Amino acid sequence: MCRLRVRLLAALLALGALPIAPAARAQDRLDSGANWGGVGLLETRNARMRPDGALEAGLAYRRQRTFWFLNFQALPFLETTFRFTQRLDGRSGNQDSTDRAFDIKLRLLQESEWIPAFAIGLQDFVGTGIYSGEYIVASKRWADFDFSLGYGWGRVGSNDMLTNPLVYVSESFRTRPVDVGQGGRPSDVYFRGEDTSLFGGVEWRPLASRGADSVWSGLRLKLEYNGDRYRDERPNGRGDARSQVNFGVQWTPYHWLDAGAAFVNGTDLLLRVSFILDPTRPRSSPPPPPPMPPRPWLPAEQPAYGTRAAESATAPRIVVPSGVREVIAASGPLTPVVPVPTSAPAAPDGSPAPPAIDFADPRVRAALADAIAVRLRQAGMIASRIDPSEPLATIVLARSPFRTLAQTAARAIRAAQTALPPRTELVTVVLLEGGAEVGRLTLVRREIEKLQSGQSSAEEIAATAMVGAAGAPLPADAVPIAGTWPQFSWAIEPLLMAQVMDPDQAFRYTALATASGRVAFNGGWSFGGTIGAQIVGNIATPTPSDSTLPHVRSDIGRYLEEAKVPILSLTAQRIWTPAPDIFARVTAGYLELMYAGLSSEVLWRPANRSYAFGIDVNAVAQRDYNGGFGTLGYSVITGHASWYQDLGVLGLTGIVRAGRYLAGDWGATFELVRKFPSGIEVGGFFTLTTVPFSRYGEGSFDKGIFVRVPFDLFPGESTRSSAQATLRPLTRDGGARLAVESPLYQLTEPGRRDALEREFYQLAR
């Protein structure tokens, strides 16, 4: 099941069109995609890779074949490709069939002046095995030519050019069993089979001399010899290709587009197009932060505002930053007092510095807090409590439009600059989500001031920053800001709910118009929900599920067919911190389209550690198909213990969940997520449970990939919203988990030290 906001489709295209540095664009044009996905020539792969982290989605079409592919450069040296094929059934010759496959390519050597790049790959190693094969390949550039030579087994080497040299090591390598099953299980026939073959070719960029900024420098001509003898997969052998020599032209006019045409197998014209997203550099020139005004030093000749008790020359003088006179005047009888000579250090401009503020008068503290709150509101932030103290001030934000805590804290200090006390050197910004604290960050005010004049940098600000434990006690005398609670939010948005890679149809979808609203109260309480109205779709006649397990997910098509105006969610929720670094959530109501009930979660997430541990327990009942208030007869208690580990390299996080799933099966889910500095996340997962592969059905076990894209990457107002697309080869019932709106780790992740180190550059934005 894939839930994907329609805005994500436009966002991905817009992101690809964002400007990128010319040097990076030139690098992207050095390598181009193959017809089956991944980087290569035409039908064969080479030892090249996309830029680290690049996402590529596209299709290749020829008579009786359509290859849909999604390529992810998971690591600088690891390419992964998921492919879905619609083809003529070679066994019957008269109907279409579908096939899903997963490929990997591992680069073992980087190219140098004398040594070629060298890679090893597994093709269709988790699938039905129809296209399974293995290969080793080397690539070397010379001027504007790129030569590749490889050696293949299985489909890659089915041309029977050479005998497998491994048969001289063991006779077991002579045979290659063909077991086209339900797919989803790793193969055990690697590098086996007597038939092997060489493959390779050359790629020429005839207009490379025009320079990286020319769209024509991305034009390339390709010629290859393919070691795969088959045009299709007919058991009687009539599927042989007429020729193993293929040729074509490919054009990469922009860093986000790769298109081409080729003549393959001696019989077929093939058209290919793909779109590429580089999540490491979504923008070449992000907008600068607003200017930071100078610190409000108060010259001695200007009057200070204080209480009547401070009018004598011997009483402590009360000084309030400039620009807040109207706020103080409205708070009570505050009158100007005669300045008192001071021996305090001079201000940066040479004028005398003001004496310390006397916080004994609560009206002065309230005036300062209100002045800061006004400035924060003008910057799009809503304050809940403020402690305007020296040398440490605290700002508690009930709402921020910025995705990261780093940008939130830096923007809050810039906004409050003219109302903060002059001697305040440290500012702690506490961020709430729905009334519950998710993180706190303390910054050195002077470092942000120095950034304005180029004397500091985001790295230096981050080096002096302190990440605090969420839920730790706040200053007891912090001033509450009137009118903060309750917080209302609403949205009217399109929503696309889709099933992908169904054996009978590649793409089933339903488009809905959704209206959502939520009200949040102090203390972490919130109430709200989302309803939808169907606009268009093709899930009018979903194929009945053949699952022998309880239909906990496989009947999703029936929900999308019968629920004309579904209640997508309607919940009461509380999120809070019972102790420092410990978060808790309780959600009750209609949790998602398919389930209602009670969901609870506790998370221990130390702010300055690389790990976290959580437990969730859920008692749910399956909802009626019409998306209303009724339920069916199925109920289950499900839950997991989860360990989250930041791996400390390349933005990788590993997650292991173990527990009971919606169908009552027990097992574990393994996730690997990579988060890029841009905020884009790409991850993969698989689940193994007590359900045997044979009973699970086609696909053998649950697996998939997902992409999260924050909307603050695109021009417009700042927002914390994001969209997620989850792609599964099949929607089955084994290993199915409950989907909740506010998973605690994802909600509180901005408050971790690791998040600051990964996105420190946001301190300067």
Image (cartoon, helix red, strand yellow):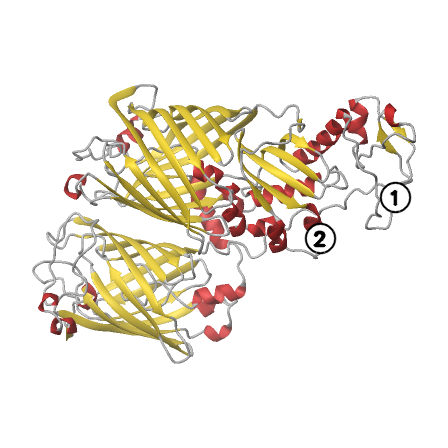
Question: Which residue is more in the foreground, 251 or 321?
Answer: 321
Does 606 sit above or below residue 215?
above
Q: Horizontally, is 40 left or right of 492 in the view?
A: left
Which amino acid is tagged 2? Lys
Which amino acid is tagged 1? Ser
Q: Horizontally, is 89 left or right of 702 in the view?
A: left
x and y percentages locating residue 622 in the rendered image: 28, 25
In space, the residues marked 1 and 2 are separated at their CA atoms by 26 Å
x and y percentages locating residue 751 in the rendered image: 52, 41
Query: What residue did someone put label 2 on?
Result: 450
Q: Horizontally, is 362 left or right of 102 in the view?
A: right
Q: Work out which residue is located at the far left of the displayed protein and give it.
A: 236
Mark number for residue 408?
none
C-beta proximity under 8 Å, tags 1 and 2: no
Q: Secondary structure at mark 1?
A: loop
Label 1 Cα crowd, 10 Å radius (few <14 / some 14-19 / many 20+): few
Residue 377 lies in what quarter of the image?
A: top right
Question: Which residue is more in the foreground, 396 or 21?
Answer: 396
Does 384 sit above or below residue 93?
above
Query: What residue did someone put label 1 on?
Result: 343
Picture residue at 15% right of the left edge, 39% below the top: 695
x and y percentages locating residue 594 in the rendered image: 31, 28
